[in-house]
Amino acid sequence: MALQWLRFILASLFMLAGLITLFAATLGLFRFHYVLDRIHVAAKCDTFGVLLTFASLMVILGLQAASLKLLLIIVLIWLANPVAGHLIAYMEALTNPRLKDNCEVIPYDPD
Amino acid sequence: MGVRLLTNYYETASVILFSIGFATLFLHRNLIKKIIGLNIAETAVYLYFVAKGYITGRAAPIIAGGIQEADAYVNPVPTGLILTGIVISVSVTAFALALIVKIYKQYETLDLDEIMILAGKEEEG
Amino acid sequence: MKMQNKPVGRGWVNWKTKHGKPAFRRLYAALSVVTCLSFACVLLFMVSALPPFGDPGNPAFNEVPRKYIEEGVQDTGALNIVAGMILDYRAFDTFAEACVLFTAAAAVLILLRSDGPLSAFDSLIQEMEDPRPNVILMQTASLLVPIILLFGCYVILNGHLSPGGGFSGGAILGAALILYASAYGTKRARRFIHYNVLRRTIALCLYFYALAKGYAFYAGANGIDAGIPKGTPGALFSAGLIPLLNIAVGLAVACVVYLFYILFSTGEFR
């Protein structure tokens, strides 16, 4: 009984935190205006929010095949989502000629 | 009547989604945003159809455990119809985007009003 | 009469040149909002008169889905009733669907082909065709592409047993190809998937589909034994023609999706 309560509380905590994070991501996507701000919010909050909500679902499901599938989805999203965000930001930095008007630019020095 | 709107919440949501897509199609002057609106409206139609095929408490139409009674599964027909619809929508979207690329090459803008003005000038001159 | 009309006309012309465009835009926006809202109201009124959601007595659940569910496995051999429906009962519909996809690819090809000298836009696109190789994207793609390809093959091959099938699996395969091409450049992808390969694969798949299903329908309509074994329902090699048709549709969809990417990313296929 105590274990079930613990599970429920853990799952609801994870789910609440995940929903708040995803809400922050959506809000930031609408409220920010510049590309780099928006992609910052979308990449970070989306990735973390999905981790939290799926962790909550895994706690609810317990140890079975479905929760392993959820784990696979988390791995896929943690691989793919930051790379997609990086690519959008990289494209913006490559193609925007007036980058300095919008943000601070530190010249990249490979050495 | 209002109660029925709440019991049919999937259909209500799909109608609202369709209106959002329709309004996007009208209100935005950017051609690509018009295509996005068209796709939102199409998604609403898919949601409507699949919601009409659902029956509470029944399984997806994949025979499991040898049970072959009609009362054990949801309606498979709307799913099959929507499969067709998705493919058609992909084709139409690709075709429309190709047309937009062509228009952009000609007028170098995506704003519909500016394109109309430029086309009018072309016709006069 | 002339004296009276003239100032009115001039005033109207003056007003039109000064405020015409914003006024028209505001009127247009108001009219479109009113149109959309009235449309939504009509549709909501219709929704309120529909049978309730999830009702077993829904008139859409008539004898057609009943027949598909009760006799589908005996007729087609596929456990997935939707796959059995779209690839056996209504197979010509699906064939026309694949043809529509092919036609869209051909139309995009015709529209984006440029015969004249390259414009500024074309040269800009050619510059961007193979951008600087991005190490992060290449490493991620080398990890993900084989897994996505494997998953796409799984979805296509199990189309008659589980959710999935030719269209969804083909879209997954196409996504894997697009990821490879965007990570390593279309030039490197062209070494093993050339334009001719794409074209021939799509045409071959459509021909195979038309011939196989045409033969099955002809034999079935004339009461001839088609000689296509159904197998035991639930096995990987079962359900007669459905796995083969799924593979054909999946390959065609993957090629068309990849062809769309190639055409839109390079502007023109050489």
Image: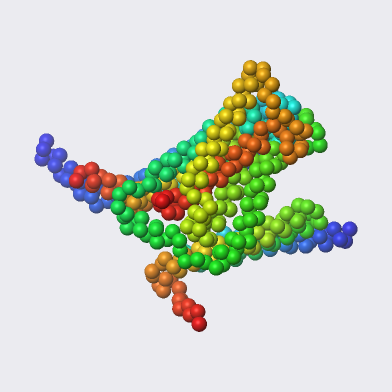
Image spot of residue A9 (x, y percent): 79, 61
**Residue in front for this viewpoint, B104 or C91:** C91
Q: Is residue B55 left or right of residue C29?
A: right
Q: At 35% across and 45% down in the image, what residue appears?
A: C27
Q: Is residue C119 visible?
A: yes
Q: Residue furthest bottom?
A: A111
Q: Is residue C27 left or right of residue C261?
A: left
Q: In the rendered view, would you say C140 is above or below B110?
A: below
Q: Is residue C51 visible?
A: no
Image spot of residue C244 (x, y percent): 64, 36
Image spot of residue C124 (x, y percent): 37, 59
Q: Quadrant of residue B87?
A: top right
Q: In the rendered view, would you say B16 is above or below A22?
A: above
**Residue in front for this viewpoint, B96 or A60:** B96
Q: At 32% across and 54% down in the image, what residue appears?
A: C118
Q: At 49% across and 39% down in the image, what residue appears?
A: C102
Q: How is the image coloured?
A: rainbow
Q: In the rendered view, would you say B22 is above or below C217?
A: below
Q: At 23% across and 50% down in the image, what residue appears?
A: C17
Image spot of residue B108 (x, y percent): 33, 54
**Residue in front for this viewpoint, B28 or C106:** C106
